[in-house]
Image: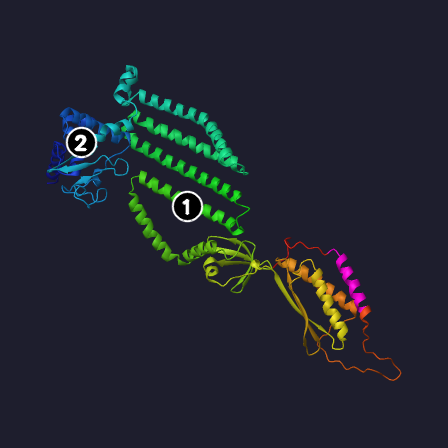
Amino acid sequence: MKKIIYLFLLVSSYTFGQQEVKVDLKNPNSTLYTHIYFLMPDNYDLDKAASTIRGVPKEEAGVKAKKIKQILDGNGLIIDFAKIPIDPNYIDTVNFGMRTQEQNKHRFVPFPMRLPKVYIEKIGTNWYYSQETVANVDALYKKTFPYDLSRLNEEFPKFFHTSILGVSIWKPLLAVIMLIISAILYYVLEPLFFSILKFLQKYLFKGFFSANSLTILHELARPLVMLVIVRFLRRGLPLLQLVQWNAFLVTGLKIAETVFWIFIVLKLTKFMLDYYYEREGASRSRLDKQLAPILSKLIQGLIIFIGVLNVLTVLGVDPTTVLTGASIGGIAVAFAAQDSVKNFIGTVVIFLDKPFQIDDWVSFAGVEGAVEKVGFRSTIIRASDTTVFQVPNSKISEADINNIGLRIYRRYKSELGIRYDTPPELIEAFIEGIKKIIALHPSTKSQAYNVDFIAFGDSSLKILVNVYFKGLDWGQEQESKHILHMAIIKLAAVLGVQFAFPSSTLMIEELPGQASIAPKYVTDQGKIDKKVEELMDSFKNQDLTMDPNASTERGG
């Protein structure tokens, strides 16, 4: 019984294999299959292949049918019949739409991205190559094959038509010649392109010679040359008539072309950013300079994304599908990484609002220090004790920031306590002396200060000292305080003014047989003025010059 079943299956498969393929134009799949099948070497029948073209004489239709097949082969396009619709009433709503009566037709484009003008349409009950396709066949053929293949074949001597393993000798020979020409082009064009780029840099970007400019130009010249070579190979590849290999080779060359373009655009972007930030460096803020690497990474990411999208298109993927998938994936990633998205938005807000600059001293939400770096996700702040805070940019964009670095002056306020037994004359002289010290101080705003006897404290007389220092750096401020304090202490020593401190004093003015221990003050106004004048002269002669813009290593 089993032998009978096996015999039946063998006869059935043989009968099926021997079925004759007939002309079938009932749907897009059968029309394209009819065209390609009857132009294959084992099934060659030009009249049947020409039946897919209407509106022209039979002989001309045969020529058009052959050219369409050669155009597909020359561009490395292989029809995947599993993806061709079999619906007799198919309507292509993607490439033709359904908005007008003209567009509402039964049409199908096998390769919408690569050959949009080659498509079939339904006329009556059958599908044929469109009139637009027939009208553009000669132009497309000439674009694909710059040289006439039939004429080229005739010019080759008969020896070159000898076939080895089914391949004519002239094909590998022509391939070798093309490779030799490509090598010559590289060695000739590379120095030429480099010279042209240097010439353009000299006259278009005057005065710009960064350390890496020549390196960038060298790196830019090479892919430009390779781009020319790839274009040359793409133009010459159809001449080889390597039908089986064309799809692979053409795809590879197009991917290589995309990669070279990505490299060229990346190098041009880097060159332009270097030029822009060097030219505008003096007028741009420190935060804008921090933006350079971030902006560079964003542009690089965008360029690479576009390049990958183009590669996927070369591989036959619909870019609309890729963009849709990227959008859906982006939404999913955004939900999964909400904090990262918030931090990136915070980064954008920081660069737009510019609440601080690099090296500014800021204070917010318990964090105080100098801004060192603003990144994609966070900002680096170094405190006065060199502690590093890495604060998410989303928090910074929402915080109330006190930018101490934007102050015009640094205010300093202190209260001096002197003894209660200080004579009024010395109090007045002491206050006036402090005013003169402030006026002579190299780092104070001499027009704005306060030195006044303001209160009677528990154990001292209170004198307010309120000044403004010009140096905005924390270290400069401390040095300015040091100079001011030392001058005030020297003034007190010269005048005999004593500073009080919280204490309880039992004073016995006189003891029998002993002199009084009460402090003795100079109250002669002439002597007081002379001592103050001598101190001010000494203060003037000291080397107290301070540069408010000088930097310091001390913390803030």
Pointer 2: residues within 10 angstroms few (<14), some, or many (20+)? Answer: many
- Taking the spot 34% from the left edge, 40% from the top edge, the residue there is 310
Q: Can residue 26 be seen in this view?
A: yes
Residue extending farthest right: 513
Q: In this view, does 429 lie above or below 332?
A: below
Residue 35 image label: 2
The residue type indicated by label 1 comes to Gly
Q: Mark 1 points at which residue?
A: 301
The mark total stands at: 2
Quarter the C terminus occupies: bottom right
Q: Return the residue nearer the eye: 348 or 410.
A: 410
Mark 1 or mark 2: name the one nearer the start of the chain. Answer: 2
**Element under label 2?**
helix
In the image: residue 106, left or right of residue 444: left
**Picture coordinates of residue 353 (x, y %)?**
47, 56
Q: What residue type is labelled 2?
A: His
Spatial separation of the CA atoms under disc 1 and disc 2: 44 Å
> Which image quadrant for residue 82?
top left
- Classify residue 529 as left or right of residue 463: right
**Picture residue at 43% right of the left edge, 45% below the top:** 299
Task: Residue 498 in the image: state x and y as whole percent.
Answer: 76, 72
Is 13 or 368 nearer to us in this picture? 368
Q: How is the image coloured?
A: rainbow
When the figure is inspected, residue 223 is found, relative to residue 173, above or below; the finding is below
Q: Give the range drawn in magenta.
A: 527-543
What secondary structure is marked by label 1? helix
> Image quarter for residue 341?
bottom left
Quadrant location of the N terminus? top left
Q: Do the residues labelled 1 and 2 touch (CB within 8 Å)?
A: no
